[in-house]
Amino acid sequence: MHKYKHIFFDLDHTLWDFDKNSEETFLDLYNIYYIEDITTGHLNPLNF
């Protein structure tokens, strides 16, 4: 078993901007799979 020397907790989003990363990820998913046009609210078919 590995022993860890350091564990980082990013409680104030200084190392990782979770909110921005989540937004970008969801926008990528919407664009890739055409889940929903977030500007008009129209549903588009999934592209599998």
Image (cartoon, rainbow, N blue to C red):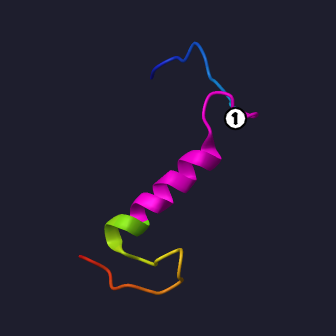
Q: Assign the magenta stretch its main secondary structure.
A: helix
Quarter occupied by residue 12: top right
Considering the image in quadrants, where does the C terminus appear? Answer: bottom left
Three-letter code, disc 1: His
Dot 1 crowding, Cα within 10 Å, few <14, some 14–19, many 20+: few
Q: Which residues are magenta?
A: 11-29
Residue 18 on the magenta segment: yes
Residue at 46% over, 78% down: 36
Q: Which residue is mark 1?
A: 13
Q: Nearer the viewer, residue 1 or 35?
A: 35
Left or right: residue 25 compared with residue 9:
left
Q: Residue furthest front?
A: 40
- On the image, the x and y values in percent for residue 18 come to 61, 44
Q: Nearer the viewer, residue 41 or 2?
A: 41
- The answer to whether residue 42 is above or below residue 19 is below
Q: Residue furthest left?
A: 48
Residue 23 on the magenta segment: yes
- On the image, the x and y values in percent for residue 28 come to 41, 58
Considering the image in quadrants, where does the N terminus appear? Answer: top left
Dot 1 falls on a residue whose secondary structure is loop
Residue at 59% over, 47% down: 20
